[in-house]
């Protein structure tokens, strides 16, 4: 079973990203693919690292075929793409906190959503002249 070294993974992903950028709109590309990386390629499966679960779910649902197509065009052996969210500092804190049962999950979820939504809110304020 073939495993690629980090430099080869980075080169492969850079090439795939170039192909993805041509296929989707610029705003979507910047929003969803800016902080991504090819974490591993083992056998026929490639694993893409995404900044958070929100991005993971979105790309899985909207762009998995585009990602697979871009990777397969470069590396025919890839027939499967998996996505993994990198843990945020808050998620790491919550998983390490002994009293995590006492922490309201909704508060944690809201904090993660704010991190994702901050840029969107700034765009809205700019659009309406605030």
Image (cartoon, rainbow, N blue to C red):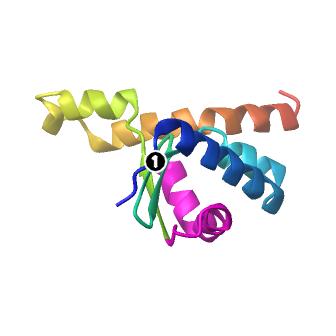
Note whether 100 is above or below 60 in the view shown. Answer: above
The extreme front residue here reads 2
104 sits left or right of 32 in the view: left
Label 1 residue SS: loop
Quadrant containing the C terminus is top right
Q: Mark 1 points at which residue?
A: 4
Residue 78 or 51: which is nearer the viewer? Answer: 78
116 sits left or right of 3 in the view: right
Q: Which residue is depicted at the point 59% across and 69% down? A: 76
- Answer whether residue 48 is magenta in the image: no
Residue range (magenta): 53-79
5 sits left or right of 129 in the view: left
Q: Residues within 10 Å of mark 1 (few under 14, many from 20)?
A: some
Q: Main secondary structure of the magenta part?
A: helix
Q: Which residue is depicted at the point 40% across and 63% down? A: 43
Q: Position of residue 16 (x, y in %)?
A: 68, 54
Quadrant containing the N terminus is bottom left
Note whether 36 is above or below 43 in the view shown. Answer: above
Q: Position of residue 36 (x, y in %)?
A: 57, 43
Q: Quadrant of residue 102?
A: top left
Q: How many labels does the image show?
A: 1
Q: Which residue is depicted at the point 40% across and 51% down? A: 3
Residue 89 or 43: which is nearer the viewer? Answer: 43
Q: Where is residue 79 in the image (x, y as percent from the top left)?
A: 50, 72
Q: Which residue is depicted at the point 19% across and 29% down? A: 96
Q: Position of residue 56 (x, y in %)?
A: 49, 53
């Amino acid at each position: 079973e073939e495993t690629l070294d980090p430099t080869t993974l980075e080169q492969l992903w850079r090439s795939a990203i170039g192909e993805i950028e041509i296929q989707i709109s610029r705003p979507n590309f910047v929003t969803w693919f800016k902080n991504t990386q090819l974490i591993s390629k083992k056998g026929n499966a490639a694993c893409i690292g995404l900044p958070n679960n929100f991005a993971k779910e979105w790309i899985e649902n909207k762009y998995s075929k585009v990602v697979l197509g871009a990777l397969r065009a470069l590396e025919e052996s890839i027939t499967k793409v998996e996505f993994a969210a990198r843990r945020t500092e808050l998620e790491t804190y919550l998983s390490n906190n002994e009293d995590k049962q006492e922490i309201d999950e909704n508060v944690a979820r809201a904090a993660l959503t704010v991190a994702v939504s901050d840029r969107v809110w700034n765009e809205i304020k700019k659009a309406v002249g605030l």
